[in-house]
Image (spheres, rainbow, N blue to C red):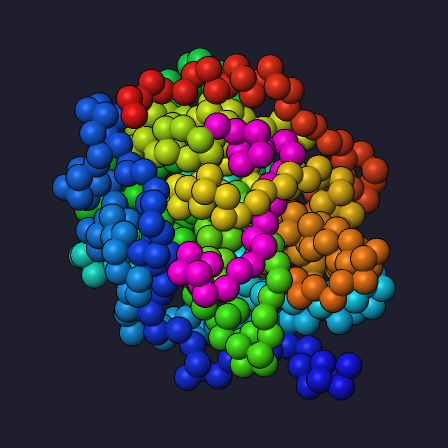
Amino acid sequence: MSDEKKIPYKIYLDESEMPTQWYNVRADMKKKPEPLLNPGTGKPCTAEELSHVFCDELVAQELNETDPYIDIPQEIQDFYKMFRPSPLIRAYYLEKKLGTPAKIYYKFEGNNTSGSHKLNSAIAQAYYAKKQGLKGVTTETGAGQWGTALSMACSYFDLDCKVYMVKCSYEQKPFRREVIRTYGGQITPSPSNTTEVGRKILAEFPDSTGSLGCAISEAVEDATTHEGYRYVLGSVLSQVLLHQSVIGLETKAALDKYGIKPDMIIGCAGGGSNLGGLISPFMGEKLRGEADYQIIAVEPASCPSFTRGKYAYDFCDTGKVCPLQKMYTLGSGFIPSANHAGGLRYHGMSAVLSELYDQGLMEARSVEQTAVFEAAQEFARVEGILPAPESSHAIRVAIDEALKCKETGEEKTIVFGLTGTGYFDMYAYAAYNDGTMKDYIPTDEEIAASLAKLPQVNG
Ligand SMILES: *Cc1c(COP(=O)(O)O)cnc(C)c1O
């Protein structure tokens, strides 16, 4: 007890203790993720092919499976200092409310205008685009956090930022839209008739309210048909996990500062970038046989890529213009039920996390959205922060695990990622508060029908 008292409510690092290199967990994986494939040839994508879509330096990072550490350029380190290091917070009040002997910590990434961890990668991607002398970048955004983060990063480096925003979010989240426009981002609701892919999707499904996979296709087409533009993606890719490793590196440094060893690390998983970043240095220790941790990915029951998907090559986008990636997927045509309000609606998953999960190095759980919002509310009322619905998936499982400790009397140390704030998700909170929020779990038949359309790939 007396030892514990010495641990502050918030553990901050000094600027001088911030990471100066990102950690690339693939370097420590004996069996690496499968390569991205060119859908035309079925062969691994070359750097040359990828460079038509992505910035050169980011292609190099995407394909780098050997360097464990990659320097963070000074300009990015300087930008990080505006909102980092982020605090690692001991959830004393939540522990007390739950009456658990578990010790709960959360790494809070919501303390910047984008309201999420996404700025960590946005600034890196904008930096490399600028360095290459590009005019601008294109991207998709679902709930809007990535679009916001990227527009912030692009305005900092004076780059054009074209955002394809999933139509239902565009309509439901007018304030997100205005934040993006305030930072100079240009927004198009997707599917749109400004791209060939968008027109094709609209012809087939005129009432489509859009999906991430579809917005990705439009953004890629825009980038590859305009001189001086490249496409950037806010999750899923290995380069994004690399940038997000700053979350895990800071978390580990803060824990080490107080000699704390976590038993369990929990994060929500949409495309896998925050979770991949949070766990990277811990997974590295696990892969090198230096330590062991229980690692849990939490996903929505309405979009259960890990827990009910298939580990197979699939398209990263609905329009099938992106490379094929081997990942846990529900099929690129999978669109979660319209009443799903909790984010994390991507059909696939990071290739790195998929491979680690397949090797049994991490677990996954799916949770229903009413249970997620219940956890969000419980957390908000004692810890003060109004969490993003996405982040609240991790809160749900952290609370469940802490309650298990209450039964067994185990004093486990639980660390979870609190990826952001939920101020732009108040319609979802309203549905929960009004009692009109419903859970929807796709049937086996629905998932099977979607998986039946996976591309045929040898090997
Ligand atoms: C985008 C987002 C996520 C999910 O994305 P990952 O790539 O899986 O990390 C989680 N939380 C918040 C707040 C987000 O904005």
Residue furthest left as drawn = 48
Residue 379 % position (x, y): 75, 59
Q: Residue at x 57, y 45 (%)?
A: 363
Per the rendered image, the range of residues in magenta is 284-310
Vertical order, 403 against 226 (above or below): below
On the image, which quarter does residue 10 sit in? bottom right
Residue 453 % position (x, y): 43, 16
On the image, which quarter does residue 157 sit in? bottom left
Quarter of the image with the N terminus is bottom right
Asked if the magenta segment contains residue 100, the reply would be: no
Q: Quick check: 47 left or right of 366?
A: left
Viewer-proximal residue among 107 and 428: 107
Residue 194 % position (x, y): 35, 29
Quarter of the image with the C terminus is top left
Residue 161 % position (x, y): 35, 49
On the image, which quarter does residue 312 sit in? top left
Q: Quick check: 57 left or right of 259?
A: left
Q: Residue at x 21, y 40 (%)?
A: 50
Viewer-proximal residue among 371 and 44: 44
Q: Quick check: 364 left or right of 321?
A: right
Vertical order, 418 against 361 (above or below): below
Q: Taking the image as drawn, is residue 374 in sight? A: yes
Asked if the magenta segment contains residue 285, the reply would be: yes
Viewer-proximal residue among 204 and 394: 394
